[in-house]
Image (cartoon, grey):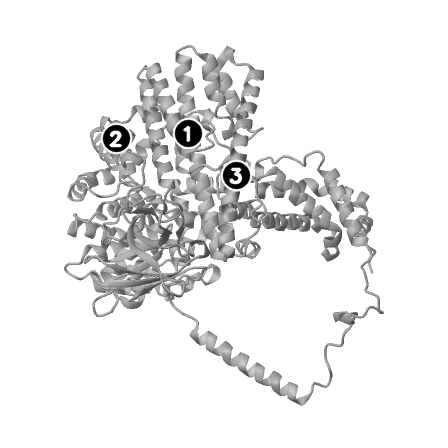
Amino acid sequence: MTAEPEPAIAFRTRLERVQANDMIALGELFTEFGGLVYRAALRLTGSRSDAEDVTQEVFVRLPGAVRGFTGTAASFPGWIRRVAVRQALMQLRGGRRRREVSVEGVASLMARTDHALDRMSIDSALDRLSDDHRTVFLLKEVEGYDHAEIAELLGISTANSEVRLHRARRQLRDLLRGSR
Amino acid sequence: MTTGFFSVLHPTFESLSEYADMPELDAARSRVGRHVARCDDCRKIVDEIRRLGDETRASQVEGVPAGLWSRIATAATVAAQEQAKPRETPSPEAPSWKPAPALRPTRRWPIPARKTTRIGLGLVIAAAAAIVAVLAWPTGQSLQASGLSRLTFSPARPVPGGTMTVRYQPSPWLKGASRLVLVGTYALPAGENPTAWWRREQMGDSIATLLPARDGAYEGRVRLPKDFLAMQIAVTDSVGDQADTDGWFLWGVIAGEPTGAPSLRALLAAQETFAETNWGEGAAQRNARINVPDSLKRYFPSHPAGWAFSRDYGVQKGAFSFLRFFQTAERRYLSLHEKLWPAKSLDAERLHDMVVFAWSIEEPAQAELWAKRLAREHPEDPRALPDLAAVLHEVELRQPKGLADSIRPWFPLFDTLYRRSPTVALRNSEVLSLVDRYADSATKALWHERFAQRRGVDYVLYVGSDAEVRGLTPSQIELLRGELGKECIRSAGKFRLFGSSSDEIRRCRTAKANATRTLAHIALLGGDARGALALVDSSLGFRRQAQRCFYGWSGADRIGARARLTLGDTAGAERDLAAVAPFFSQGRDSAFTDSARTALGRHFDAGRWTAALDSNRAVHRACADSAKVERDSMEAVRKARIRQ
């Protein structure tokens, strides 16, 4: 029988401390993974205040949630990221999203110019997509989920997930081409 | 003209998007992969699609804000304290105390015989109900929605000139309305349906009024026109604020023959328009509840249309790709070819469908045969020219020796076909790019003028670069002026098929703003800076009417800034440029700031510029917040109605 390596034991111990509501251990996890959770939430919700709420929700519930985590230290970032994505989706589903950039019609953004002033960033273009399209695009392109997983997360069919992705890409391309 | 035209030219955007996600090996083996390997244009689109993902992944997202941890620590401590509180257990002496559910025995063993009989009987009944449910479950194509609402027609295949009864089970947000409106668009015969780039934004006609029935549903009768083929419909409230559709799609009705049999003409018309509205053929066939190619195949198996427009032949991939031939598409093509090619005369529809079918099984030489025959036998058909151009594009991709000499002799035929059918859609067609690459300057000028006429006002509204504005013809400038004279009001009897009809007024005002902006641009290039400024002001006025939280507009403000710089008003130019600030996220405006620095030269003041950006963003945010409060309260009212 091989002994468990030391970092793995340290990691397990830290999770046990988190389970026991040890705020110092939770703080250590926040220092290490807070950015990852916040960024995933910010991308999906598109709102700083929503991303903060999601991050808070994830870490407040972490002492209970880590009981269900049976993986290794290496798989923890992926696990917590998934938790963050699910929490962000719940936030979106609850209609609690606070959009910080106003949405404008696609057509009005198609005024093409040859000037650098009009260059739109991918983030601004993403902000102009509907929540449905944006979420599928980000889950696929940034979070790396496949359509079956996205379908399961959003409660839609796989085909619907594919269509949303195509539409998101078409609109993004139109927006960016319109501004470049 | 038709979606089929796009599919014979290049793969649809959806196919390219799907291709972009495929593993490399599968991608190279796919049909789209083989096309992309040879076609620069499609490769460029695939690159753009992949770049969208790359750019999103590469874009920096800000880190955790300061103070978040203290907020979390407080909340987590409170939660931990709640968890640690001892749970109150009722005293055993209390009169109402009973054992907790978990402590109560839940099952007696052995189960008494009478109970066993009851369980057995229950299982038999459940099994019988399951079998009935499976048998009664609707199969095949249904004309009903499966969501919150439902629309049914009787008869399901109405006769042109006849009457159709419509019954609508309303969605929660349309419940309780005193009347509803059935809105829709009629399909024209195949080959005549106009192409609309953004067809889902089109307006529909009021087809019938639906009145409440006793059971809460709504009913109405529709008298169909004598030339009725097919239509797509939605239901809206009486003012058009909210439309209900069949999920992502519109409900569809396809005419039948007086005998009740399916009508080929109607199905062909439906195939063309439904696929167009439903965002490309691929998406339409995978997800729409009405699969027209499937009906065509089932009822008219000897007609090529059903086979030509199908995208799902159950083709094996990877190691089993050699089975493709036996999986109907190629074999079916061969049998149709053997039957149809010897016929002395064929209608344009079959010829065009064979072109599409040949492309779908990747037989360019076969597509060429049929496209040339279509051009020869039916030069009046609007599909003849684009089909022929697609064939020549394929020749181009092979890059044979003396390519230009083999393409040029086709231009007189292009000209003949255009004259025979001037309604042909040149947009998205390969015609102009072939002319651009191989024709002499006079032919190029002739086709560009034709193209400009066909593009209409939609194109003129969105020109933006100096070169594009300089290239506008007098007739196009007239189109712009015509846009200014339009009154932005709701047209009687017209409704949006998707979304709210009030958006139409916003679109009209935005179009006016775009037209005025382009006229300002023309004035600026013509040296009339003051005239340009006046037009810019008017353009921004239209935009403010169209959009509540208007936050500056890169197009018009840029022209305004250029005009002001020409007049020596650098402070005004800076103000105009800074107005666009909310358009860019904070921290992502460096390119924008660099451009302003270049434009303003020595007059650029970094401190003043940053202050102006911050102030504009704050004003916009305040407006957006108050708009959100209003939207939320309206949404709450809507949700309350749904709950009721």
Q: Indicate left or right for A56 with B92 as reference.
A: left
x%, y% of residue B436?
28, 33
Q: Amino acid at mark 2?
A: Gly
Q: Indicate which disc residue A24 carries.
A: none
Q: Nearer the viewer, mark 2 or mark 1?
A: 1
Location of mark 3 (residue): B628
Q: Which secondary structure, mark 1?
A: helix
Q: Chain of mark 2?
A: B
For the residue pair B3 and B238, the one nearer the viewer reads as: B238
Q: Indicate which disc residue B482 carries.
A: 2
Q: Chain of mark 3?
A: B
Do callouts 2 and 1 point to residues on the same chain? Answer: yes
Q: Indicate left or right for B275 with B381 as reference.
A: right
Location of mark 1 (residue): B544
Task: Look at 65% across and 88% down and name the residue there.
Answer: B114
Do callouts 1 and 3 point to residues on the same chain? Answer: yes
For the residue pair B238 and B586, the one nearer the viewer reads as: B238
For the residue pair B373 and A109, the one nearer the viewer reads as: A109
Q: Which secondary structure, mark 2?
A: helix
Of callouts 2 and 3, the N-terminal one: 2
Q: Amino acid at mark 1?
A: Arg
x%, y% of residue B395?
29, 44
Q: Amino acid at mark 3?
A: Lys
Is residue B74 in view from this perspective?
yes
Task: Look at 57% across and 81% down and name the residue there.
Answer: B123
Q: Which secondary structure, mark 3?
A: helix
Q: CA distance from mark 2 to mark 1?
A: 21 Å
Q: Indicate left or right for A136 with B202 as reference.
A: right
Say above or below: B407 vs B93: above
Q: Residue furthest front?
A: B95
Q: Chain of mark 1?
A: B
For the residue pair A63 and B74, the one nearer the viewer reads as: B74
